[in-house]
Image: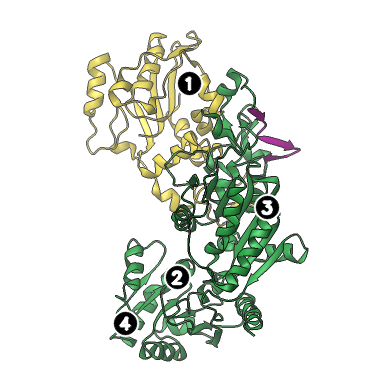
Chain colours: A yellow, B green
Amino acid sequence: MNCLLCNARLPVRLNLGDLLMLRPLERPVICEQCRAGFDRINPDHACPGCGRPQEHPHLCCECEQWQHQYGWHLNHQALYTYNDAMKEYMQRYKFLGDYRLRQVFTVELQQRIRQLQADLVVPIPVTTTTMATRGFNQVLGLIGDATVAPLLRHRAVDKTAQSHKSRRQRLQTPQPFILSDSAVVHGKRILLVDDIYTTGRTLYHAAILFKKAQCSEIVSLSVAR
Amino acid sequence: MDLSEYYGRRVLIDQPEWRRAKPAPPIEVLPTMTRHGQMIRCLRCGQETACRVAALPNDEFYCPRCINLGRVATLNKFYHVPEPNQFTVTSPVLTWTGQLSPLQEEAATTVDAGMTAHRHQLLWAVTGAGKTEMMFRGIAHALARGERLAVASPRVDVCLELYPRLQAAFQNTSLVLLHGRQELPYHYAQLTVCTTHQLLRFYHAFDNLIIDEVDAFPFAANDALLFASRQAVKKAGGCLYLTATPGPALLRQVRRGHLAVSYLPLRYHGHLLPRIHLHLAPGWRRGLQRGHLPASLLSQLRRSLDNGYRFLLFVPHVADLAVVGPILQTALPRHPFTTVHAADPDRLTKVQGMRDGKYDFLVTTTILERGVTFPEIDVFVLGADEPVFSSSALVQIAGRAGRSLSRPTGTVGFWIAGQCRRVRSAVRQVNFMNRKGRALKR
């Protein structure tokens, strides 16, 4: 097995436990050097609203604005900062479409999803055009085999990808989603999962629909921030 | 998209686009992948991948092997227009006015004849024989016949060096340069200069394909490269491989008679290649750890410098540079030198410094094996038997010496811990060419 990112050989290290326990082997998919390029966010030193790394435990100014606009704010967590290594990763995974790379963060993401103890795990959907060209939903790929409730759909209107817009254009994007079944949502703790949190616009749009459907609580999670 | 962009190429089209409307003829719609049981084959790079690895959701697949050229997936189609050879030939085609030596002349004639007959041929020319100029006549005649041509190399730097030379030699012909880091968009041209990877974008496009430094790649003459060259050439097209160090795959083809071979065993100045001298230095690496170089190497280095010659010293690994550097600093205190390796940020300025005569010698890893010419130098390799030095790399390294008319010879020394196949094969290749060369000179 070789590292998915740099193609270096991964050494196989088996210990006695691996040999004796009847369980599937958990083998790393990327090498330690590549792993070290990603910058993990400590949730204790991050903004409680958007998960950006910072020293103090108060809302950052962007989240203050959301709070001001809607009267509430998200509880978002992110696993990693959006540094150069992460940018390169997303470029290859999403835009080049190397679907094998979905495995890089799956273990950590599933772990965090379990910790957050939601009733429904809702992945952010992709447009039908993206699905027809890319062939996969990057969020579903990242989540792997964990149980999800794909309750969100994109409106039929063709839209430009968020990544092609400026910050201001992103913030002015109208509601792109439809909630397909609002009855199941009632009184549930919802976990929204996306790949990257940039301005928060997408996740706020999604959260608004769930709030309207009277869910009990919303938390959200992304791989990068 | 302009129709000419499809000529002789297979252009990847996304699902929404090809589903929207069937393209008008002459555009053909071709499939991108085929499945055989548990394996899926990419029709662009020809490589097979296990379906398990190449799977996308909904029973779709993609090719992870050539993904850096843009992803080929079962979601895509290729649009292709058979090569129409729509060129207007403006004479004179060849605007190069240089002179060939009688030996080069002979090789140029063979190359020209082979290209006219669309043969598959190998030109085995020693390092520093002036291969590029020898192709000019063949290229010129082919261009005048209205053929579409490509000159490809596994290395970007070789392409970057070839392009301006070809542009100057064929000023009335349309040229295009293609490689992975190229930002200019593609356009239809009669003469394409590209990396061998880029050949995968073409399909039955070229009447003649020339591949320079075929074996420059670590995966020399590997399957993907052979596949790329085969499918980029028209079914009745010809292919010319140029190299100083043909690898086993090419030599096998020669032995089987699939490939015609012509030799150019003498350099442009008519001298033989410098012979490789082997020096046994068992345990040189242990000595290095204790801070000394083999005594025979040090005395050879001193001798070269005393004779007023500069030299290149190759070491196997980047880490060795940090050890060898200080040792030489104390051993040869009066001589300015530096160390350079592939990832060195000052690589270009250091090499230029050597050219300008700022240094008496350079200590380096394999990066300077090809394409770099310093006049009147000696060449030494410490640890030539280590696996980083392939036999073709060793021949290329040895070929750095004796390239100039002012000093057509030079000393080439390999210090080895023990005999090995790669070193022996390199020595044998040099001796083989010299034997042929001597026969010619007689």
For the point 44% across and 34% down, the residue is A112
Give the residues drawn in magenta, as a range.
B27-42
Numbered disc 4: what chain? B
Name the secondary structure under disc 1: loop
Q: Are the residues under badges 1 and 4 in a single subunit? A: no
Q: Which mark is residue B238?
A: 3
The earlier-in-sequence mark between 3 and 2 is: 3
For label 3, the SS is strand
Q: Residue tagged by mark 1?
A: A119
Vertical relation: B252 (above or below) A101: below
Q: Determine whether, in the image, residue B303 is placed left or right of residue B229.
A: left
In the rendered image, residue A70, in percent from the top left (x then y), is placed at 27, 14
- Work out whether mark 4 precedes mark 2 in sequence or the reverse, and give the earlier one: 4
Q: Residue at x 36, y 91 (%)?
A: B306
Viewer-closest of B7 and A182: B7
The chain to which mark 1 is attached is A
Measuring from the top left, give residue A77's x and y in whole percent.
36, 31
Residue B245 visible within the image: no
Q: CA distance from mark 3 to mark 1?
A: 66 Å
Whether residue A142 is in magenta: the answer is no
Element carrying mark 4: helix
Tell me the number on the disc at residue B329: 4
Magenta segment main secondary structure: strand
Q: Judge whether residue B28 is colored magenta.
A: yes
- Which mark is in front, 2 or 1? 2
Residue B15: % across, % down: 58, 25
Amino acid type at circle 1 is: Asp
Res B365 label: 2
Q: Amino acid at mark 2?
A: Thr
The quadrant the C terminus of chain B occupies is bottom right
Q: Chain of mark 3?
A: B
